[in-house]
């Protein structure tokens, strides 16, 4: 993948010229360029990062050919180090893969049902291990059945478990459909489970599903712990999780302090009350900030939201625009639109995506927002996702999609704007108008 290194002043001028000409906010521009807003404002704008070629082409699309050539002369084309072959060859990531090839042969990955060792820019956090255990039946060659993948966070949790002398297994299936990062045992019986994640936002509805499974199989008092690495996007999810008997711990220090108490049935009730109290205090401090941000967001509308608004008008549904909702725990959320049918308010969530990862994220995001908005007010939810990733029908496992739309009353996933009116009619009335 190629990039272009421009002088800092020229790069800043190019970005600001495009932004001003299009009359875009930084948030709108970041969406158009498919990069983070803070990264755009601080790193790209100030020349700390070179421009990816597709971003450069976008910014110069309306410039004259001579002006674009002049910018190319002033800049320098470079290779993205993260994707260069030499970087992969010398990286620790490939050393792990080479070790597996040497130990088990060149057909190792095909034996266990994988096409090959896929390396991504996020895989630097993974440590590949082969570990002897009794629960590794995952298909493929039975001789090589115990492969486990550890993130840095999972490794830290595993090390802490060893220090606490806990009996545990990793990536363990308690049923055909539900596996957990850590399952804890006493006298060969499971006594608690744990999931680790960078943040709870994406996995929120997945955790609720697993809690429901645990309730049916082991009872409501069975401990379920979620350890997160970052408080980013946590918002009031911690309160909702605690409400559903899911203990959320936000760092390893807190985990060391409270973990054994969670396993102890005699102390768990008081601990839950304490954690709930701590979360409520934190939310009370953030409540007004959240309210200010929500009403600021209510005044912003992107092209997709505007298009959905115009379609709702055409269908005679009288859209009321964006609406702010206050959750039971004092945090504020914004729906992208609101309309009423038969005295029932329907909140609309609108998103777009251009990659499989982005689609998965939007599915989980819609599920989380749908759950919270339903708890915040007596509304139904319509999810609309514009999918340009060409993967909407390519899921080998439909669980993310099913999980998302379990919480939405009406849903539309489309890659054509032209048929949105028919899709909305079909979702609401079960037929095309």
Image: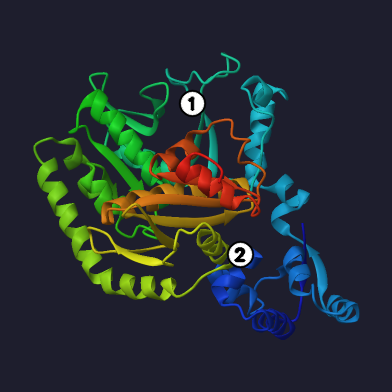
Between 332 and 432, the residue placed more toward the observer is 432
Left or right of residue 165, residue 107 in this image: right
**Could you say where residue 226 lies in the image, as x and y percent from the top left?**
32, 44
**Could you say where residue 19 lies in the image, as x and y percent from the top left?**
65, 79
- Is there a contact, CB below 8 Å, between mark 2 and mark 1? no
Residue at image point 58% right, 63% down:
307
Left or right of residue 182, residue 307 in this image: right
User: Does residue 181 appear in this view?
Assistant: yes
Residue at image point 62% right, 81% down:
23
In the rendering, which numbered label is found on residue 35? 2
Give the total number of marks visible in the rendering.
2
Q: Is residue 336 above or below residue 102?
A: below
The span from disc 2 to disc 1 (Cα, nearest Å) is 38 Å
Instruction: Choose mark 2 or mark 1, whichever is in front.
Output: 2
Asked which secondary structure carries label 1, the reply is loop
The extreme top residue here reads 142
- Judge the density around disc 2: few (<14), some (14-19), many (≥20) Cα neighbours within 10 Å: some
Residue at image point 37% right, 70% down:
294
- Judge the density around disc 1: few (<14), some (14-19), many (≥20) Cα neighbours within 10 Å: few
**Could you say where residue 256 lies in the image, as x and y percent from the top left?**
26, 47
Left or right of residue 273, residue 327 in this image: right
Q: Earlier in the sequence, mark 2 or mark 1?
A: 2
Residue at image point 66% right, 39% down:
95
> Which of the 4 image quarters holds residue 302?
bottom right
Quadrant (top left/top right/bottom left/bottom right) for the N terminus: bottom right
**Could you say where residue 244 lies in the image, as x and y percent from the top left?**
24, 43
- Report the residue marked by disc 1: 131
User: Does residue 125 appear in this view?
Assistant: no
Between 293 and 393, the residue placed more toward the observer is 393
Q: Is residue 36 above or below residue 411?
A: below
Asked which secondary structure carries label 2, the reply is loop
């Amino acid at each position: 993948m190629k990039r272009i290194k421009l002088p800092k002043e020229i790069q800043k001028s190019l970005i600001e010229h495009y932004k001003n000409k299009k009359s875009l906010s930084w948030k709108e521009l970041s969406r158009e360029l498919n990069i983070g807003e803070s990264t755009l404002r601080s790193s790209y704008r100030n020349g700390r990062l070179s421009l990816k070629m597709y971003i450069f082409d976008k910014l110069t699309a309306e410039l004259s050919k001579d002006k674009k050539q002049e910018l190319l002369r002033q800049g320098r084309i470079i290779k993205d180090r993260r994707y260069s072959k030499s970087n992969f060859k010398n990286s620790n990531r490939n050393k792990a893969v080479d070790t597996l090839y040497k130990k088990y042969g060149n057909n190792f990955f095909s034996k266990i049902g994988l096409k090959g060792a896929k390396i991504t820019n996020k895989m630097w956090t993974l440590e590949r291990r082969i570990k002897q255990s009794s629960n590794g039946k995952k298909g493929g060659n039975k001789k090589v059945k115990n492969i486990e993948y550890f993130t840095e966070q999972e490794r830290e949790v595993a090390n802490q478990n060893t220090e606490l002398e806990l009996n545990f297994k990793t990536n363990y299936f308690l049923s055909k459909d539900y596996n957990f990062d850590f399952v804890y045992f006493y006298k060969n019986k499971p006594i608690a489970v744990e999931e680790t994640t960078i943040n709870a936002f994406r996995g929120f509805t997945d955790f609720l599903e697993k809690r429901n499974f645990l309730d049916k199989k082991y009872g409501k008092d069975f401990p379920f712990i979620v350890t997160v690495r970052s408080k980013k996007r946590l918002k009031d999810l911690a309160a909702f999780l605690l409400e559903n008997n899911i203990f959320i711990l936000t760092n390893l220090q807190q985990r060391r302090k409270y973990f054994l108490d969670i396993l102890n049935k005699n102390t768990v009730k008081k601990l839950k009350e304490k954690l709930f109290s701590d979360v409520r205090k934190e939310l009370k401090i953030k409540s007004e900030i959240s309210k200010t941000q929500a009403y600021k967001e209510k005044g912003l509308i992107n092209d997709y939201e505007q298009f959905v608004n115009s379609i709702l008008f055409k269908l005679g549904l009288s859209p009321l625009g964006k609406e702010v909702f206050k959750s039971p725990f004092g945090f504020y959320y914004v729906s992208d639109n609101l309309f009423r049918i038969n005295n029932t308010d329907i909140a609309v969530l609108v998103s777009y995506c251009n990659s499989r990862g982005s689609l998965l994220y939007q599915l989980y995001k819609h599920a989380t927002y749908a759950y919270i908005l339903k708890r915040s007010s007596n509304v139904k939810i319509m999810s609309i996702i514009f999918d340009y990733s060409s993967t909407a029908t390519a899921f080998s496992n439909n669980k993310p999609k099913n999980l998302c739309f379990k919480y939405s009353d009406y849903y539309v996933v489309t890659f054509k704007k032209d048929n949105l009116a028919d899709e909305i009619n079909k979702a609401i009335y079960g037929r095309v108008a």
